[in-house]
Image (cartoon, rainbow, N blue to C red):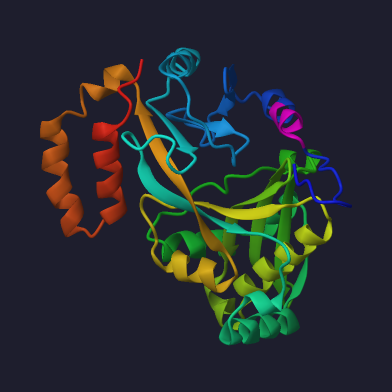
Amino acid sequence: MFAEKNISISPWPTEKVVRFLEGRGQRVIRAASGCWHEPYGHGRIVMPLPVQRCVTPEQSEIAEVFRQAPAAWFLRYASDPGGEPLNSLDSFRWVCRPPYGLEKLSANIRHNVRRGLRRAEMRKITFREILDRGWEAHSDTMRRHGEKPGGFGVDAGLDEYGGYEAWGAFVDDSLAAYTVTLIMDDWAHFLVARSTDRHLKRYPNNALLFFVCERLFERGYIAAASRGFESVKGPEGLESYNASMGFRKEPVQQVIAVRPSMRLLLNRYTIAAALPVLKLLGANRATRMLRLIRTGPASA
């Protein structure tokens, strides 16, 4: 927890989040180093809880997590820099810490944020509002990133739990942008960010992210806000955006542990065949991640 004087205690400890997820039927695995869960719904990838936790699990723990998550192919986790030098990928996560304000932004971005704040109304919204009014922002964002629009990834049931929060920017009563956060202990994690194409020139993204960060840090118990780990697939443009909004790269090491039966399919021949194709596509991070899978913990 954030140990400075006069800092409030977070009302959303990890155990509270765990109980909420379990109550919704999600698998949470309790192991030696702490909890693990299946964040993407399909069960193929398992990651630690809380999201910000860095771990260096023993092989016995990796084996136990795979045993309790029979559909999982991979464990993806972060360790502290220097924690697993032979089996990890030097990486980072995007983090912003208080104090936070306009002075953290470049002159150009400050201008865009001020314009966005003048042109849009910022407020907390319900997840039901996202489902009812957010399709344009969701589908436009997915297409900009080269993906086919699918489900929202959220549901109205999240309104039952205060650790998940939704925030929106409205232009002419239209939901121009929205974001979703999850608070765990003294960290706030930005899980979703969506915006409409037709309102981009009004800078609702910049204004909303700035507005939410300010509101979060005003509470006194938030020590850090995160926009996630380095992506294995981009898009690259998000790096300059995160940096321009006052987020910084904090180093970690990313590790992929592969289920033993899957490693039979990830031999040096299949990976060697895939790497040239990935390079032609410019997928440098995916190339690095495949190399990591090849050299990562054999597992269990």
Residue 283 at x, y = what percent? 26, 55
Taking the image as shown, residue 178 lies to the left or right of residue 216, namely: left
Image x and y of residue 6, in percent: 89, 52
In the rendered structure, the answer to whether residue 44 lies left or right of residue 121 reads left
Return the x and y of residue 58 as percentages of the image width and height.
Answer: 45, 20
- Nearer to us in this view, 4 or 68: 4
Q: Is residue 87 above or below residue 248?
A: above
Residue 260, position as x, y percentages in the image: 30, 18
Looking at the image, is 75 positioned above or below residue 287?
A: above
Segment tinted magenta in the rendering: 13-18
In the figure, residue 101 lies in which quadrant?
bottom right
Asked if residue 124 shows in the view, the reply is no
Q: How many marks?
A: 0
Going 56% across and 28% down the picture, which residue do you hit? 37
Q: Magenta span has 11?
A: no
- Residue name at image x 46 percent, y 52 percent: 92
Q: Is residue 150 visible?
A: yes
Choose top left, top right, bottom left or bottom right for residue 73: top left
Q: Is residue 15 magenta?
A: yes
Q: Residue at x 57, y 45 (%)?
A: 153
In the rendered image, the residue lying farthest to the right is 6
**The N terminus is located in which quarter?**
top right
Q: Is residue 211 above or below residue 295?
A: below
Most foreground residue, 4 or 27: 4
Magenta-highlighted stretch: main secondary structure?
helix
Q: Quadrant of the C terminus?
A: top left
